[in-house]
Amino acid sequence: MQEKQIVIHYGELSTKGRNRKMFQTRLADQIRHKTSKIEKVKVVPQHDFMYVKWQLMTYEDMVAILKDIPGISRFEPVYEVSKEMGEIEAEALRLFEEIGPKDGESFRIVAKRQDKSFPLKTYDIQRQVGAVVGQAFPVMNVNLKHPDYTLTVQIGVKDQAFLSLQSYQGLQGMPYGSSGKGLLMLSGGFDSPIAGYLMMKRGMELEAVHFASPPYTSPQALEKAKKLTAKLAHYGLPLKLHVVPFTKTQEAIKEHIHDNESMTVMRRIMLRIMDQLLIRQKANAIVNGESLGQVASQTIDSMRVINAVTNSPILRPLIATDKNDIINLAQTIDTYTISNEPYEDCCTVFAPSSPHTKPKEATIEELEDRLDIDSLVSEALAQVETFVIDEDYIQAQAAEFQTLL
Ligand code: ATP
Ligand code: MG
């Protein structure tokens, strides 16, 4: 069977000097992981680009996989034929037929000769292939400066020539796992999955943390967090989801802290737990979906008081993003329908009617003395439940559920 191949261009990654090897390894790992169920693909890194070579999958399937892998700026399918002009011309026609050029569009041919003994010079190859294409597709004209399509013909050193016509946009960003590890605070809302997606696209490995307060929060709310985690795993590798039991803390807050300040105290306890998890999971940062001014806990005054309990970096990729743009992204990465499910998470269930937008740190500290925070934190930590989640996990779970019916 003939080998298929795609050339992958890295974009920003190619500026990374000494780290380049690590970046390439991460990218290669992900490509291998995403294709591993079907076949063993070959990944061949070069200086500024890499080849993926394989046999079984269709080009379309491989394109669909590569489109969702961070760290790829663009990629081009490359088609191999034997090094004869007849074959090259036939393949050129087939490729143009596949895209079906429209009236008024333009093209150019770019030839490259690695084999300097090839009888035709670069210019002659371009002219000859160009003439054949132009004749077959009179709707197109030639445009050497800004064509709609560029067909590249590379005359290889061995017996083959390589043609490529279509170029696809990648996700951009950096390879997953090339920029440290973060713990994503994942609620069931729209924001936090998008925050996670953006950090993953920037190369950060993630584990998700969900605070649950059963029986006040439903099993469906937890399911939601799992499904959102699976959507994120699509852009990286299988993700851990840590579920922190938060009922006892919520009840203690309800009993001892009055409504106006309860949100601030609750968030501060969440962060204290996150801090411990950071050490336990050897992660470098907390990631959340906060957006300035979105709700009372996300005013700058609130954030300062909440933030005061930790020295860990808190990354807020959505801090300056409008809700509309967040919703658009949720539609793009397909988390919208899941986030839109009605099941409420712990913050919504216990949400006070009029939370303070300008809490005072001293007041909050005084109120916190009414709680045994250390015990609440350590008890919650002792009962964290961890799942490893990807799209297969959700499918298997759904199948199991079906058999129970
Ligand atoms: P989202 O912000 O994801 O839409 P939300 O709007 O319900 O959810 P907010 O009240 O805006 O949540 O909370 C701000 C951030 O706090 C969330 O983006 C998320 O990172 C974190 N967070 C809130 N609730 C939880 C939870 N139950 N478990 C984990 N993290 C949470
Ligand atoms: Mg929010």
Image (spheres, rainbow, N blue to C red):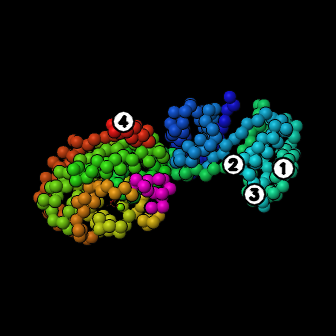
Whole-angstrom CA distance, mark 2 to mark 4, is 45 Å
The x, y position of residue 69, in whole percent, is 53, 46
Residue under numbered circle 3: 102
Whole-angstrom CA distance, mark 4 to mark 3, is 51 Å
Q: For the residues carrying marks 1 and 2, which lies nearer the camera in this image?
A: 1
Indicate the secondary structure of the residue bearing disc 3.
loop
| Callout 1 touching callout 4 (CB < 8 Å) | no
Residue for point 18% across, 66% down: 259
Earlier in the chain: of badge 1 and badge 3, it is 3
**Numbered circle sitting on residue 191:** none
Earlier in the chain: of badge 2 and badge 3, it is 3
Visible in this render: residue 188?
A: yes
Residue under numbered circle 2: 166
Q: For the residues carrying marks 2 and 3, which lies nearer the camera in this image?
A: 3
Residue 337 is drawn in which quadrant?
A: bottom left
**Numbered circle sitting on residue 136:** 1
The x, y position of residue 227, in whole percent, is 39, 47
